[in-house]
Image (spheres, grey):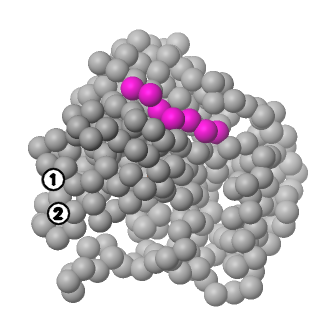
């Protein structure tokens, strides 16, 4: 097998690299696909999504805002081959999380936390505030064998101001890092490369420690597990790891990783194979019924459209 992510297969890597770069540079509008019925995408719509996903690991979906509800989202994601949802703290019964700022009433957010919810409130976590979120992939704190392969994020209501997402195809980061030095790939593929301490509150472990690689190859596909945050993160303490982490960090300001920027409007959604993303802070309307509201689903699967 010619695995482009095998460091000993230079020819396979170069062939993959050439194919990969053919799609870039690209604009956010190149990612857009209009869907008539979210719960029942047509073959042509699925094919248009597949083209974007194959090139960029993500697509921007446009639907009538009235189409967006939990049931339709689950049907839509099933049509993309996504079945195994990632159980997370605040997903409701159908695994759809409502992302909005502050701990509003649980009736509005639909977040039941079970026994964990009694001690950890959504406001404890930055995604559920109006603060900026640094670069990360979803589920970096999950166990290595329960990594998030794909996610989707759909906008019901936008913020009054801000809430812009940055998005980078993680394969593009890999490509630039490997070009800079294969040693960076070696360091970041080490199973001890990146640790996230356990989340403990009042003596209870709400989430165990997670230690694993940044880059791994799963079923022949490249997976990335990453958080740019500076606190509550433990990088393997070797010179190679620190050099690779710094090189990766510097890429975020380089134009040739082709960062997409997008502020989701009502009816717009992103689907991705868990690409790198960040979010700017935002200002909301005072009325909670008009405040920013996004629906999110996470899956252990990657997108597979036939
Ligand atoms: Fe995220």
Marks 1,2: beta carbons within 8 A: yes
Q: Which element is circle 2 on?
A: helix
Direction from residue 234 to residue 256 in the image, left or right: right
Direction from residue 180 to residue 264 in the image, left or right: left
Closest to the observer, 137 or 306:
137
The local crowd at label 1, few if under 14, some if 14 to 19, many if 20 or more residues have their Cα within 10 Å, is some
Q: Is residue 157 above or below residue 37?
A: below
Q: Position of residue 137 (x, y in %)?
A: 52, 56
Residue, disc 2: 117
Q: Position of residue 289 (x, y in %)?
A: 22, 34
Q: Which element is circle 1 on?
A: loop
Q: Residue at x 47, y 43 (%)?
A: 163
The quadrant holding residue 19 is top right
Q: Residue at x 74, y 63 (%)?
A: 250
Residue, disc 1: 112
Q: Residue at x 86, y 48 (%)?
A: 14
Q: Which residues are magenta?
A: 260-266
Q: Is residue 197 above or below residue 188?
A: below
Closest to the observer, 85 or 289:
289
| Residue 25 seen by the camera | yes
Q: Position of residue 108 (x, y in %)?
A: 16, 41
Q: Residue at x 13, y 67 (%)?
A: 118
Closest to the observer, 69 or 174:
69
Kindly report the distance in space between the C-alpha atoms of the residues bearing marks 1 and 2.
7 Å
């Amino acid at each position: 097998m010619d695995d482009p992510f095998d460091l000993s297969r230079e020819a396979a890597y170069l062939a993959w690299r050439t194919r990969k770069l053919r799609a870039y540079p690209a604009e956010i509008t190149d990612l857009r696909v209009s869907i008539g019925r979210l719960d029942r995408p047509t073959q042509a719509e699925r094919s248009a999504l597949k083209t974007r996903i194959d090139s960029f690991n993500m697509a921007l979906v446009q639907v009538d805002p009235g189409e967006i509800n939990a049931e339709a989202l689950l049907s839509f994601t099933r049509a993309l081959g996504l079945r195994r949802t990632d159980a997370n703290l605040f997903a409701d019964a159908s695994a759809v999380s409502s992302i909005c700022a502050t701990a509003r009433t649980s009736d509005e957010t639909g977040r039941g936390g079970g026994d964990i919810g009694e001690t950890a409130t959504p406001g404890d976590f930055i995604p559920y505030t109006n603060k900026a979120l640094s670069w990360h992939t979803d589920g970096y704190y999950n166990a290595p064998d329960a990594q998030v392969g794909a996610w989707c994020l759909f906008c019901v209501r936008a913020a009054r101001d801000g809430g812009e997402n940055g998005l980078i195809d993680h394969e593009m980061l890999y490509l630039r890092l490997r070009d800079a030095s294969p040693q960076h790939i070696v360091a970041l593929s080490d199973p001890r490369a990146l640790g996230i301490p356990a989340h403990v509150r009042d003596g209870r472990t709400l989430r165990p420690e997670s230690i694993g690689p940044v880059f791994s190859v799963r079923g022949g596909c490249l997976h990335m597990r990453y958080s740019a945050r500076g606190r509550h993160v433990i990088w393997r303490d070797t010179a190679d790891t620190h050099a690779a982490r710094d090189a990766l960090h510097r890429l975020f300001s380089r134009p040739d990783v082709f960062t997409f920027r997008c502020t989701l409007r009502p009816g717009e959604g992103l689907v991705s194979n868990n690409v790198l993303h960040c979010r700017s802070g935002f200002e909301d309307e005072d009325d909670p019924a008009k405040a920013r509201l996004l629906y999110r689903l996470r899956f252990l699967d990657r997108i597979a459209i036939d």
